[in-house]
Amino acid sequence: MLIHRYAGSALGGSDCEEWQPGLLHQPVNSLSSLAYVAAGLWIATRWGTDRADRVTAVVFGAAVLSIGVGSLLYHGPQWPGSAVVHDATIPSAVLFITVNDLALLRGWGLHRQMTTYAMAVAAACLLAVVLPASSGTVVALSAVSAVAAEAMLVRRRRDHSARAALLLAGTLLAAALAGLAGRTGSPLCRPHSLLQGHALWHVLTAAALLQWHRLRAEGKAGRSRPLRPTR
C-alpha cells in the first residue's frame, strides 16, 4: 500500500515508490524515465539511407522521447497537466509500430503512413484529455494492435533474425515482470528502496523500443540486399 499522506491525490501512487517533497516526488521512477529520452535521441539521430528512413526515424525517436518527458513530469514535479501528458504520450510509440507494420503489409507510401499515424495519435491524445479514465484502455488497445500487426508481419515476411526477435521478446517479458513487481501492494514493493520495479520497467521498455527500431532497420537492409543468383 502507499504510505505517504497524499496517497489519494498524488500521481504515481500505484508505482510503489514513496512520495517525497521536492522537485522529484518519486526520484528513482523520475530519473529512470530518462532511459526513454536517451533511446529516443539515439533513434532520431540514426538515420537511414533515404528520406523515408530519415523521417520515420525522427518521428519514432520523438515519440519515444516524449514518453520520457511525460513520465518524468508524472513521477517528478507532477505539475498540473502532467497526468494528461503522461497518458497521451505512452500510446505514441506503440501506435507507430502498428502503423509502420500496416504500411509494410499494405505497401503504403510515406505520406499515407505519416497521415494515418498522426490521426491515430491525435485520437489517443483527445481521449486522454476528454476521458482521462480511458487512458489504460487506450494503452492496452494500442499494445494489442501492435502485437497483432507484428504477428501479421512476421507471418507474411521473414525480415528479422530469430535471435534478435527472441531478445526483444525476452526484454518485453522481463519488463512485464518488473512492472508487476513494482506495483504498490506487490510482495516485492519496497517504497524506500533505490531498486524500484517500475523504474526497471522504464529502462526495459525503453530498451525494447530501441531493439524494435534496430530490428526494423535490419529487416529493411535484408529486403534491400540483392538475392544471390541460383545455379
Image: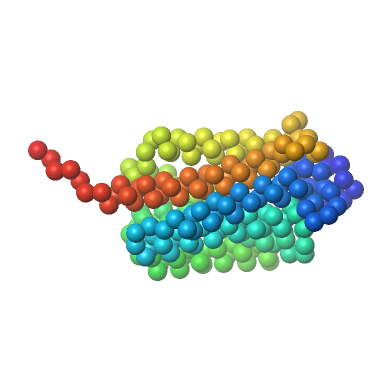
Q: Position of residue 218 (x, y in %)?
A: 37, 47
For the C terminus, give its image quadrant.
top left
Q: Residue at x 46, y 47 (%)?
A: 212
Q: Quadrant of residue 185?
A: top right
Relative horizontal placement of residue 122, taking residue 31 as reference (left or right): left
Q: Residue at x 36, y 55 (%)?
A: 104
Q: Which residue ends up furthest to the top in the rendered image?
A: 187
Q: Position of residue 34 (x, y in %)?
A: 64, 51
Relative horizontal placement of residue 23, taking residue 230 as reference (left or right): right
Looking at the picture, does residue 156 appear above or below residue 23? above
Q: Position of residue 1 (x, y in %)?
A: 82, 39
Q: Nearer the viewer, residue 200 or 138?
A: 200
Relative horizontal placement of residue 3, taking residue 198 as reference (left or right): right
Q: Nearer the viewer, residue 127 or 52?
A: 52
Q: Residue at x 43, y 38 (%)?
A: 165
Q: Position of residue 167 (x, y in %)?
A: 47, 36
Q: Quadrant of residue 55?
A: bottom left
